[in-house]
Amino acid sequence: MFNDEAQALRERYAQALKAHFGADGRRINHALKVLGFAERIMTGEGVAPEVQKIVVITALLHDVGIKAAEEKYQSSAGPYQELEGPPIVRAIMSSYGEPAPLIERVAYIVGGHHTPGKNDGLDFQIIWESDLLVNIEEDGLAADKAKLPAIIEKNFRTATGRAIAQAEYLR
Ligand SMILES: [Fe+2]
């Protein structure tokens, strides 16, 4: 399903991710894990190539605002990341000569990825689910078995994402 173009994008933006975060392996691994879940969901859902492109780039870059948020505000809170992420995304993507609509869509999702009310499409939803799949584990939510069914019910809309969440965390 993933064609040469998607493969090239994945390599290009994995490099950009590593250049951005440098020695911060935790952030790099987080984004790579998010991409892994996003690819499983996209395969299961059979999403269009245009959506794949957006999702691959967004998965890798979604948290690039964290570094600036921590430097400027001493906080990695969602609203600061959402503020700081999009200009960094635009700079990285412009340097690769990406078309403006693609840049703006990725910047929009990065700028809203902690705000459920901004979720307006399948690309955004796949990022939402993939980030949550990783965060359930990283934030220790996986240990709280009582709360997980409600979290999964509320947040997962794709059949594939829901099935992955149930298989990973409810068994
Ligand atoms: Fe994330």
Image (cartoon, rainbow, N blue to C red):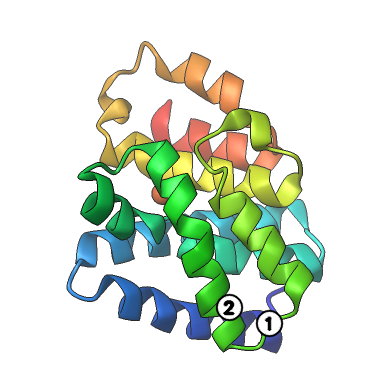
Count how many numbered circles sit on residues in the image: 2
Secondary structure at badge 1 equals: loop
Q: Is residue 141 visible?
A: yes
**Residue at the spot x=39%, y=73% of the render?**
17
What secondary structure is marked by label 2?
Answer: helix
Tell me, yes or no, if residue 171 can be seen here.
no
Which class describes the residues within 10 Å of circle 1: few (<14), some (14-19), or many (20+)?
few
Looking at marks 1 and 2 on the same chain, the residue that comes earlier in the sequence is marked by 2
Residue 111 appears left or right of 133: right
Residue identifier under label 1: 98
Amino acid at dot 2:
Met
Q: For the C terminus, which image quadrant?
A: top left
Residue 59 position in % (x across, y down): 52, 60
Answer above or below: position of 168 versus 48: above
Q: Locate the N terminus and report the quarter of the image it occupies.
A: bottom right
- The residue sitting at 40% across, 83% down in the picture is 15
Tell me how far mark 1 sits from mark 2, CA to CA. Answer: 6 Å
Question: Which of these two is toward me, 159 or 55?
Answer: 55
Disc 2, ligand 1: is the CB inside 8 Å?
A: no
Residue 75 placement (x, y as % from top left)? 25, 41
| Residue 58, quarter of the rendered image | bottom right
The correct choice, above or below, for 102 with respect to 65 in the image is below
Instruction: Tell me the kind of residue under disc 1.
Output: Glu
Judge left or right: residue 18 versus residue 88. Answer: left
Q: Which residue is mark 2?
A: 93
Callout 2 crowding tier (Cα within 10 Å): few <14, some 14–19, many ≥20: many
The answer to the question of whether label 1 and label 2 lie on touching residues, with beta carbons closer than 8 A, is yes
**Residue at the extreme top of the image, as rendered:** 146
- Residue at the spot x=25%, y=31% of the render? 140
Q: Residue 6: give x, y in percent of width and height.
A: 65, 79
